Image (cartoon, rainbow, N blue to C red):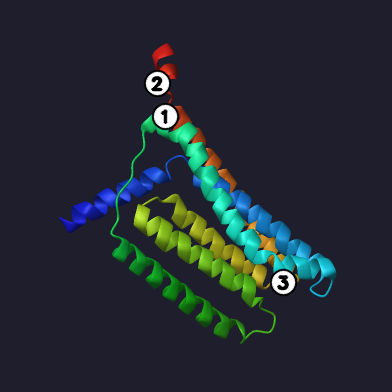
Amino acid sequence: MKDETTQIEQRVKRYWYSDGIGEMIGGVMFFLLAVYFSLQQYLGDESFMGEMLQAGFVLLLIGGIFLARRLINFLKTRVTYPRTGYIEYRTNNRNLNLMRALTFVVAMIVAAVSLLVARKFDSLDAMVAVTGLLVAFIFAVKQGLTSGVGRFYFISALSLALGGILSVSGFARGYNLGLFYGLMGLVFVISGGLTLKSYLRENPLPTEAGNE
């Protein structure tokens, strides 16, 4: 019974990612982060604008996540649900909170170990290396493993490789992070766009299917 419930939950999560909308919006978020870190490096931490950027980072992150969720729901309501319906799996809040806590703990362990290793090499940019590892971990475990969507493993591998390459590129930290988020944002937009194109082709609106 437990295996059957897990499979049902996985199918529901796989359905959530079937249209690629979340990836495309996530890509836009990554583009914003790319601009943020690049501007911060260009302006400098001690400049007035640089200090303003630092002070507004949390606001940018929280506001961006809030707007991204609203936009995803808005687009799904108009694109996805009219075609294939609305599906929701009711999860146990206790188990959900436990999974979130475990994910956070594992992510912190990965980050700590990565920082310790990075300090052994003066030429290694620890920040972008750790960022690549964390993004890879999130997409491999939280997205790929729980939903069974194969493309997330590919994105995870790209994140790991890109973080490793940029960590020894010799660029300034802000530009490294800007490049990482910009390139990964491009990957998300392309992946989500191709997924959305396939989804729309396979799932026309009922009126469109009737006209054909």
Across and down, in percent, residue 189 comes to 58, 46
Q: Is residue 46 left or right of residue 181?
A: right
Residue 57: x and y in percent read: 67, 65
Which label belongs to residue 173? 3
Q: Position of residue 143 (x, y in %)?
A: 42, 56
Image-quadrant location for residue 146: bottom left
Q: Would you say 118 lies left or right of 150 here?
A: right
Q: In this view, does 20 lie to the left or right of 186?
A: left
Q: Is mark 2 on a helix, strand or loop?
A: helix
Give the mark nearer the N terminus: 3 vs 2: 3
Residue at the location (36% across, 49% down)?
A: 13
Residue 180 in sight in this render: yes
Determine which of the numbered discs, if any, sits on residue 82 in the image: 1
What residue lies at 66% left-to-right and 78% top-to-bottom?
124
Which kind of residue does numbered mark 2 sit on?
A: Pro
Q: Residue at the location (84% across, 69% down)?
A: 48
- Which image quadrant for residue 63? bottom right
Badge 3 amino acid = Arg
Which residue has dot 2 on it?
206
